[in-house]
Amino acid sequence: MIIDFMKKRKLFSSLLFVFIISFILGIFFIFFISDNNKVIVKDGIELYFNGLSNLNYTDNFIVGLINNIGLALIIWLLGISIFGCFIIYIIYFIKCFVVSFSFSSIIYVYGFKGIILSSIYSICYFINLGILFILSYYAISFSILLFKYFFKNKDYNRIIIVKRYFKVFIICCLCIVLNLIIDSYLIPRILLLF
């Protein structure tokens, strides 16, 4: 039991480490890109915020749903594969990097006002990172269990573990949908106030 707890703690710590490193790199990446790329980032952010009044909320929701549920499904399916845990780490790293880069880029473009805009804009993305953290944790755990089952002949109650893994996926998908409703319909309206 203590060994299982230590292994789970190591997995949790490794995912947290990936989050922290990718977040820090994403925050500071804006300062290392060329001036031409900074202009492109600035134009893209200003285009987004200037176009909020014309945003089609339903299309925004549908695109977000396809992207986020698709990503969750990929992570879940990688957990079913024996060697998928390495790819899950890479996916989680990239997702954290992109969110933190967006966060810092908005602050870079809008200055002090950008702190408020960035916080409002990014809140649902940080919630989504938390959801993906949980899903990645279970996917990597499941992948490790499969590896042990096939290569180390460890026996597990597969039916209970598979049911639990599927429930985690469903719960994470429901949380993603609720988060997307807020992100697609509420957050743009709040951002219009600024």
Image: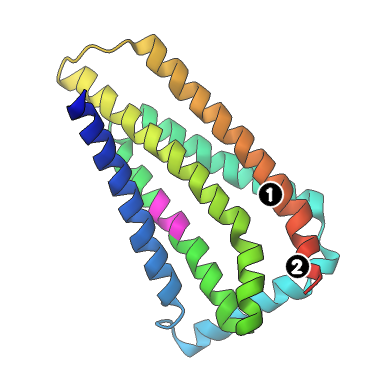
Q: Amino acid at mark 1?
A: Val
Label 1: element kind? helix
Could you tell me if residue 176 is visible in this image?
Answer: yes
Q: Quadrant of residue 51?
A: bottom right
Q: Amino acid at mark 2?
A: Leu
Q: Which residue is mark 1?
A: 63
Q: CA distance from mark 2 to mark 1?
A: 19 Å
Q: Position of residue 77 (x, y in %)?
A: 44, 31
Q: Is residue 44 left or right of residue 38?
A: right
Residue found at the far bottom of this picture:
35
Q: Is residue 169 left or right of residue 21?
A: right
Is residue 164 highlighted in magenta?
Answer: no
Q: Which residues are magenta?
A: 92-96
Q: Position of residue 129 (x, y in %)?
A: 50, 50
Q: Position of residue 174 (x, y in %)?
A: 63, 33
Q: Choose the circle earlier in sequence order: 2 or 1.
A: 1
Q: Residue at x 32, y 31 (%)?
A: 141
Could you tell me if residue 60 is visible in this image?
Answer: no
Q: Position of residue 147 (x, y in %)?
A: 23, 26
Residue found at the far right of this picture:
54
Label 2: element kind? helix
Q: Residue at x 80, y 54 (%)?
A: 57
Q: How busy is the neighbourhood of tag 1: few (under 14 within 10 Å), some, or many (20 plus)?
A: few
How would you classify the magenta stretch by its main secondary structure? helix
